[in-house]
Image: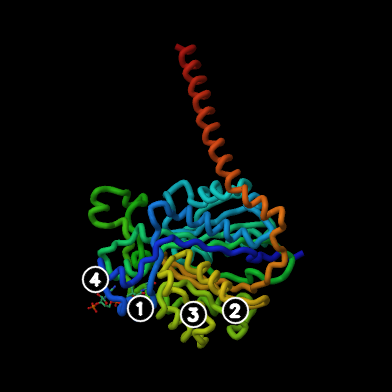
Amino acid sequence: MDRYAHVTGWGIATPERILSNEELTQFVDTSDEWIISRTGIEQRYIAGPGETTASLASQAACRALEPTNIEAHDLDLIILATSTPEHIFPSTASLVQDEIGAIRAGAFDLSAACTGFIYALNMAAQAIRTGSIENALVIGSETLSRYVNWDDRSTCILFGDGAGAFVLQASDKPGGILSCIMRSDGSGADLLSLPAGGSKLPASHETVDRKQHTIQMKGREVFRFATRVMASATREAVEEAGLQLEDIQLIIPHQANKRIIESAARGLRMPMDRFILNVNRYGNTSTASIPLAFFEAMDDGRIHDGDHLVLVGFGAGLTWGALAMQWIEPVEKPTRRIQRRRRWIRWYSRIRSFIRRVLRKIEGLIWGAKSHSRKDSNE
Ligand code: UT7
């Protein structure tokens, strides 16, 4: 029997603080008029001290599980796409796995910049289709504001923080993820990067002084690249799914710049009302932007049972990709038992995590004592 991978849950999380263009003009040499006319952005969310990539991702993940008939224990795999992980290692996905109590799930981070959510969805869908897993959680989460150079007006006005998550489940019902194309061109690596903090340029006083731990971008070049690939990637994904552009009800593009989305619409000869546009409220949230846009489209009743959608994105790497899917309204709803269990499952997982840490400490003390006594007896 054929297996299909369907999106059955979706959720988002945003930081509390909103930073408007007007407020930005108080410390950056820019204007509300310039930002809106060149990008379409009016405001963005900025993470506060207690808000991190993992905390936003965990919130979005719990919300994404709500409409489904499964709980965190039933997840087999967590893929977290991000450009702003909590650490180089461990993966942010593992922190989320612990926080939400997904005790049977494998977890890893995926780095493909703003295209990461599309890559991650495809990886999870492929794992489901091959029969190796049943349930996956795919998250895009970012705290880009932590890496913004507030003295660089060409980048600091663009980025925002937030997270979005999808639950994917196996089904024998046709539909769900239909096709995906993933592309990369590393010759453009220098166009958009965060140069220091990795193994090539480890953190030093020099890298900090040179602001090499902040986002560096050649905006015009990235703009040109984006306008080229958005339309071509969409066409390729649609063709690979055996569809025509006319069959697509809605396109959910990466939200980087309103002008890039308008240019893609022109390239595809499609009206703008078939594109989701919410960059005005969030700015560019990288891997989180597509699930944030999907969530709003769902909330506004713009996605209907049987609709064909294309998710399309581009970003640093350079990377780009597009994914075609057919939205099938999930029939399985959460049972009362699952709803009840969810209320205590996060508490249970916190207590479980705490006990495991304590046990690990005790184990360390016992092993330490044993190896000391072995050394003593050898001497
Ligand atoms: O997820 C992928 C991430 N990146 C992107 O998608 C970015 C793609 N690129 C862009 O969206 C656009 O290139 C930007 C929004 C970054 C810049 O817009 P632009 O229309 O390409 O502007 P520009 O870089 O060509 O700059 C035009 C002028 C310059 O002044 P001069 O040299 O013409 O006098 C800039 O100094 O605008 C100036 N400028 C600003 N002025 C006011 C640049 N940033 C600002 C600013 N406020 N924030």
Helix, strand, or loop for circle 2? helix
Q: Tell me if the residue at label 4 has its CB under 8 Å from ligand 1.
A: yes
Q: Earlier in the sequence, mark 1 or mark 2?
A: 1
Instruction: Please name the amino acid that badge 2 sits on.
Output: Glu
* x and y percentages locating residue 360 in the rendered image: 53, 32
Measured in 3D between alpha carbons, the distance from the residue under mark 3 to the one under mark 4, in whole angstroms, is 34 Å
Image-quadrant location for residue 355: top right
Q: Residues within 10 Å of mark 3 (few under 14, many from 20)?
A: many
Report if the CB atoms under discs 3 and 2 are less than 8 Å apart. no
Instruction: Please name the amino acid that badge 4 sits on.
Output: Asp
Residue at left offset 52%, top offset 54%: 58
Q: Earlier in the sequence, mark 1 or mark 4?
A: 4
Residue 317, numbered circle: none
Residue of label 1 = 36
Q: Residues within 10 Å of mark 1 (few under 14, many from 20)?
A: some
Mark 1 vs mark 2: in front: 1
Measured in 3D between alpha carbons, the distance from the residue under mark 1 to the one under mark 2, in whole angstroms, is 34 Å
